[in-house]
Image: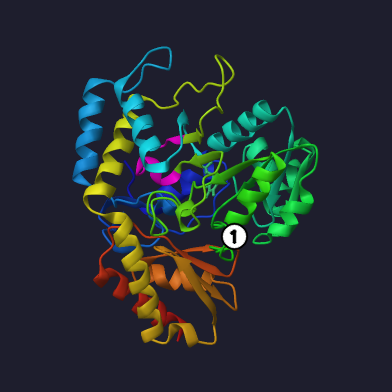
Amino acid sequence: MFSSQAEVFDKERRYIMQTYKRPQIVLKSGKGAILKDFTGKEYIDCVAGIAVNVVGYSHPVVLKAVKEQADKLMHVSNLYYTEPQVELAEKLSEITGMYKAFFCNSGAESIEAALKLATKITGKTGFVAAEGSFHGRTLGSLSVTFGHKFRATFKSLLLNKVKFVRYSDADAVRTAIDADTAAVILEPIQGETGVIVPSDGYIREVRSICSERGVLLILDEIQTGFGRTGRWFAKEHEGVEPDIMTLAKALGAGFPIGAMLAKSGLEFGASEHAATFGGNPLACATALASIKVIETEKLVERSRELGAYFMDKVRDVGLASNPVVKEIRGRGLMIAIELTKNCAEIVNSAQERGVLINCTSDNVIRLVPPLVISKEEIDEVVSVLCAIVK
Ligand SMILES: *Cc1c(COP(=O)(O)O)cnc(C)c1O
């Protein structure tokens, strides 16, 4: 199709709106935690499609499910019943403890559904969100997303009853809730802002404040779900049950799918919400296969163990005490290395040395590899980072 990478870059610039700043590589294939580019060069992938590819690339169980379902039925719309959708909803209820699901195609869409459901249930339109939050880029989800760089151009179109409060400060939530508040929306660990882990007990305290004040709690587990933090869902670290929970990213192991889950008694009625592609048979069969792999390969435990292994390793090699490194933090295989300077250069050098990493908030390296990454691959990542930082 293309004779060189340069041709891909040129045509991308000509035919695609320039919303993304991409490194100069064209990715062609992957296996496990390894990606291969146009030239055949291999990379250990610590991005995983932004915390999406939990079971790694080309997992045989997932591929088999995709092929079998594609052979049978890819899409028929929600005008009809299909088996994979019902099976996935039952499975999600089992692993999350939530009651019912609404299926959509992305994270932002699941946030839209959550905001809309909270508005319907409470009859109110105010929301309390956290400074540093990221919930998506559609107008509703952007309304509860904090960053100026995301919002500035569209400010006049956003929901206007959103109050942003300091993250990890339960008293701030208590003060912000008023008679207009439908829900408090939080990430259990803030992802895009740089893997910000709140203080112990924060989510639990917000949960009790919401219950006392008759306000819904929406937990956005789009990035933290499916074993990423060493638990199936990050809410388990605090033993908290939200009223509404949003999922996407790792749900489909690379196939686009999102879900909004709610507890018993909270639901839309007929025609109150819909999505043409939401929960289509191919997406649901893929998600089911991925969940099966997480279970059979014990990837949740693996995330916990490898997260600890990674932390030990960076300590052993002295990365944590390097003057360029401000802090290393995280849970499971959701890890951040905060630097005292911009990380663009380090991202480039790592890529040259065969490691893909991603930078959030300008100075935070976010490591969210596939949960199937091996210890040897982690060793290699740490030694590459170490060599660069030195
Ligand atoms: C990625 C992300 C979203 C948005 O998901 P999209 O699929 O990109 O719309 C929302 N919330 C969190 C926590 C995310 O990490």
Identity of the residue furthest to the top in this view: 79
Question: Is 390 placed above or below 83 here?
Answer: below
Q: Position of residue 174 (x, y in %)?
A: 74, 52
Q: Nearer the viewer, residue 32 or 260?
A: 260
- Amino acid at the residue labelled 1: Thr
Q: Give the left or right position of residue 244, taking residue 285 as reference.
A: right
Q: Can residue 283 be seen?
A: no
Identity of the residue furthest to the front in this view: 212
Q: Give the left or right position of residue 92, taking residue 119 as reference.
A: left
Q: Give the left or right position of residue 289, taking residue 193 as reference.
A: left
Task: Determine which residue is flagged by label 1.
Answer: 193
Q: Position of residue 16 (x, y in %)?
A: 52, 40
Image quarter for residue 287?
top left
Question: Is 313 placed above or below 14 here?
Answer: below
Residue for point 45% across, 87% down: 390
Q: Nearer the viewer, residue 73 or 7?
A: 73
Q: Which residues are magenta?
A: 249-258
Q: Position of residue 289 (x, y in %)?
A: 26, 39
Question: Is 53 placed above or below 23 here?
Answer: above
Q: Can residue 123 be seen?
A: yes
Image quarter for residue 380?
bottom left
Q: Position of residue 186 (x, y in %)?
A: 61, 50
Q: Nearer the viewer, residue 13 or 196?
A: 196
Ligand 1 closer than 8 Å to label 1 CB:
no
Q: Quadrant of the N terminus?
A: top left
Is residue 204 on the magenta stretch? no
Question: Is 131 placed above or below 136 here?
Answer: below
Local crowd size for mark 1, using a 10 Å CA cut-off: few (<14), some (14–19), many (≥20):
some
Colour mode of the rendering: rainbow
